[in-house]
Image (tube, rainbow, N blue to C red):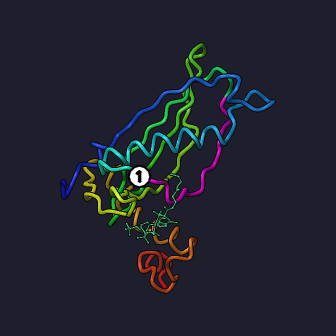
Amino acid sequence: MHKQKLAKESYVQMTELVLPNDTNTLHNLMGGKMMHWMDIVSAIAAQKHSNRIVVTASVDNVSFKKSIKLGNVVTLEAKVTRAFSTSMEVHINVWAEDIPSGTKVMSNEAFFTFVALDQNGKPTTVPEAVPETEEEVRLYDGALRRRQLRLILAGRMKPHDANELKSIFNL
Ligand SMILES: CC(C)(COP(=O)(O)OP(=O)(O)OC[C@H]1O[C@@H](n2cnc3c(N)ncnc32)[C@H](O)[C@@H]1OP(=O)(O)O)[C@@H](O)C(=O)NCCC(=O)NCCS
């Protein structure tokens, strides 16, 4: 197995067309449908990084800044930001495009965490993800802080042990 892989090697882009069955009664894309697409695109990125079957361990706060309309083209981009021992954080950006009017706006951003499993369904180690660009380094650096926050919320870490978070608040 590789010990390290470049973050960019996990990059995945997925394009979807918002069809009537994807919308609510206001003809806007349903939030659950968006989260389904996010789960798929980010799981593929985590699979590419780890070359393993992965499961979703957690989903961070997802906010819906703008509604996405029936007929819009939705582009989702996902990339691993940082790998830990058996888990990987994936960043997702979502764009909504109205082709007839030529407008394209960023509509969502999210972080999903996946765990790589071995042939027996047990968590298994993954390669380190190496950031290259300024943006990749920024996301890599913030990943430790986000990990500590989500592990505290999941009851898997004591706030007292979250050194990265404590340093932000000067505790
Ligand atoms: C995620 C799962 C594999 C963790 O299993 P576990 O027995 O708790 O394993 P571990 O304690 O060894 O943790 C494995 C990794 O998961 C991470 N993890 C577990 N729960 C987490 C959470 N809520 N948020 C973020 N990471 C989490 C741990 O930090 C650890 O990461 P690390 O090795 O990089 O430090 C297990 O809880 C599971 O199978 N959950 C169901 C997944 C699922 O069905 N998803 C939806 C469909 S794909």
Give the residues drawn in magenta, as a range.
Answer: 54-68
Residue drawn at point x = 40 percent, y = 42 percent: 44
- Residue found at the very far right of the displayed protein: 25
On the image, which quarter does residue 128 sit in? bottom left
Give amino acid for label 1: Val
- Residue found at the very far top of the displayed protein: 100
Residue 150 screen position, x and y as percent? 52, 67
Residue 75 screen position, x and y as percent? 50, 31
Residue drawn at point x = 29 percent, y = 43 percent: 8
Q: How crowded is mark 1: few (under 14 residues within 10 Å), some or many (20 or more)?
A: many
Relative to 136, residue 71 above or below: above
What secondary structure characterizes most of the magenta part?
A: loop
Give the structural element (helix, strand or loop) at label 1. Answer: strand
Residue 18 screen position, x and y as percent? 62, 25
As for residue 43 lying within the magenta part, the answer is: no
On the image, which quarter does residue 106 sit in? top right
Which quadrant is the N terminus positioned in? bottom left
- Residue located beneath label 1 in the image: 54
Side of 18 where 129 appears, left or right: left
Q: Which of 114 and 77 is in front in this view?
A: 114
Residue drawn at point x = 68 percent, y = 27 percent: 69
Q: Which of 140 and 1 is in front in this view?
A: 1
Residue drawn at point x = 52 percent, y = 82 percent: 159
Relative to 19, residue 111 above or below: below
**Does mark 1 have its CB less than 8 Å from ligand 1?**
yes
Side of 46 where 101 appears, left or right: right
Side of 147 where 2 appears, left or right: left
Relative to 9, residue 2 above or below: below
Residue 171 screen position, x and y as percent? 49, 85
